[in-house]
């Protein structure tokens, strides 16, 4: 189950988001205090975090930058009634947010955005895992190539095989 964290200093916003997102099958964790949310993130994995932009304890960009340091793979979304471009650019550049959503939000658009973010995150993590597998396989191939070159240097012709059309190995008189 995907874990979604929502941080907003307004309880009415948290309640509205809980109502909007409760049937989506995500584990929803809500916090009115960003410091408490960061403490939670130090203990529990989070797939996606949605943060208010303006909060009295800590602004959303600072909070999301700290979240990124704790959990770099958690996707980040800013939710704000303030749509100033400087703030949006700061959030994008410093906190590397996935999306900026304005208040009031459209419930369907928010659910779709969250689903897209979670899917995008899954793809990025899968790509990273596959790239790790490819790197590991490349190291194995490099090792095997080096070993073949060493064997060929020690015993010239040892790595040469005469294959038949049916996949069998053809032995010549010299091989006996």
Image (cartoon, rainbow, N blue to C red):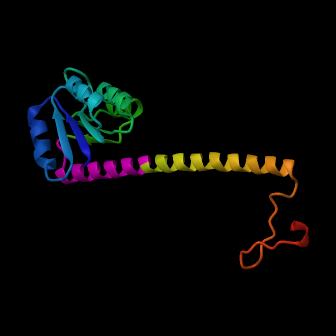
Which quadrant holds the C terminus? bottom right
Magenta: main secondary structure equals helix
Residue 28 in which image quadrant: top left
**Per the image, is 158 magenta?**
no
Q: Nearer the viewer, residue 138 or 60?
A: 138
Residue 76, horizontal then vertical, whole percent: 32, 38
20 lies left or right of 91: left
Q: Residue furthest bottom?
A: 166
Residue 158, horizontal then vertical, whole percent: 83, 57
106 lies left or right of 85: left
Q: Looking at the image, which residue is at 86% across and 52% down?
A: 155
Q: Looking at the image, which residue is at 14% across and 53% down?
A: 23
Instruction: Classify 63 as above or below 134.
Output: above
Residue 91 in which image quadrant: top left
Instruction: Classify 72 as above or below 39.
Output: below
Instruction: Classify 157 as above or below 7.
Output: below
Residue 86 makes an appearance in the image = no
**Per the image, is 113 magenta?**
yes
Q: Nearer the viewer, residue 113 or 88?
A: 113
Residue 93 in which image quadrant: top left
73 lies left or right of 6: right
Q: Nearer the viewer, residue 4 or 144?
A: 144
Tell me the magenta residue range.
104-125
Q: Residue furthest top?
A: 57
Q: Nearer the viewer, residue 145 or 118?
A: 145
Q: Looking at the image, which residue is at 80% across and 50% down?
A: 151
Q: Residue furthest right?
A: 174
Residue 103, horizontal then vertical, whole percent: 19, 40
């Amino acid at each position: 189950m995907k874990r979604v964290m929502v941080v907003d200093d307004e309880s009415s916003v948290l309640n509205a988001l809980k109502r909007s997102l409760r049937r989506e099958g995500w584990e929803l964790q809500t916090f009115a205090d960003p410091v408490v949310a960061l403490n939670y993130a130090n203990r529990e994995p989070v797939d996606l975090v949605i943060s208010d932009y303006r909060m009295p304890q800590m602004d959303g960009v600072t909070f999301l930058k700290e979240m990124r340091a704790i959990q770099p793979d958690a996707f980040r979304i800013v939710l704000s009634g303030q749509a100033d471009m400087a703030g949006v650019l700061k959030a994008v550049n410093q906190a590397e947010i996935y999306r900026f959503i304005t208040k009031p939000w459209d419930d369907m658009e928010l659910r779709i955005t969250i689903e897209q973010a979670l899917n995008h995150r899954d793809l990025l993590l899968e790509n990273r895992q596959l790239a790790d597998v490819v790197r590991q396989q490349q190291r194995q191939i490099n090792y095997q190539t080096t070993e073949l070159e060493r064997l060929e240097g020690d015993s010239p012709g040892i790595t040469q095989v005469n294959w038949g059309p049916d996949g069998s190995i053809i032995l010549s008189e010299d091989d006996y």
